[in-house]
Amino acid sequence: MWRLIICLLAGVSDGALDGYFSANKRQQGGKRLCLTGTKTESSLFSSPSAWQREPGPQNYSFRDVSYGYDENGDFALSFVITATVHLETINSWTYNASIEIFDADGNVIFTACGRGTATRFE
């Protein structure tokens, strides 16, 4: 399992994500918003978020699409994260990302850029 943390650096407005991340968000001064989550090894390194090799040592990129559902189980939104990654060690990496969130009709409701870390845990 991997623990991912991404801190949004721009595009965050007060209350913009209330209701979407209420269980997983934490404010860290001002308008900096950090989100945490976990992913299994197989979901992180397989299609459709397969990593691509990029120029330079230990550099990669990926595009990850996730979906959110409301309390009734109906599709509510999708998240698209596009990132450039640098492997720090076999068990950790850092990344810079752009984040887009779309409502159920495909309208962009949120955009931001961010930086994050990922750490393997058992």
Image (cartoon, rainbow, N blue to C red):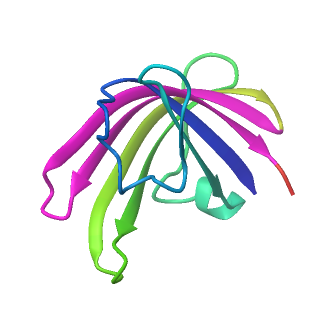
Residue located at (37% from left, 77% from top): 71
In the rendered image, the quadrant that contains the N terminus is bottom right
Residue located at (45% from left, 19% from top): 30
Q: Nearer the viewer, residue 76 or 86?
A: 76
Q: Main secondary structure of the magenta part?
A: strand
In the rendered image, the quadrant that contains the C terminus is bottom right
Q: Is residue 66 above or below residue 5?
A: below
Q: Is residue 7 above or below residue 120?
A: above
Identify the residue at the far top of this view: 56
Q: Is residue 13 above or below residue 74?
A: above
Magenta stretch encompasses residue 48: no
Q: Is residue 8 left or right of residue 42?
A: left
Magenta stretch encompasses residue 95: yes
Identify the residue at the far right of this view: 122
Q: Is residue 42 left or right of residue 22?
A: right
Q: Nearer the viewer, residue 90 or 33?
A: 33
Residue 45 visible in the shown view: no
Residue 9, x across and y down, in percent: 43, 21
Magenta segment, which residues?
A: 91-120
Residue 60 visible in the shown view: yes
Residue located at (41% from left, 24% from top): 31
Identify the residue at the far bottom of this view: 72
Residue 23, x across and y down, in percent: 53, 56
Q: Is residue 62 left or right of residue 41?
A: left
Residue 64, x across and y down, in percent: 45, 49
Instruction: Tell how many labels.
Output: 0
Q: Is residue 76 above or below residue 32?
A: below
Q: Nearer the viewer, residue 23 or 76?
A: 23
**Quarter assignment of residue 57:** top right
Residue located at (53% from left, 50% from top): 50
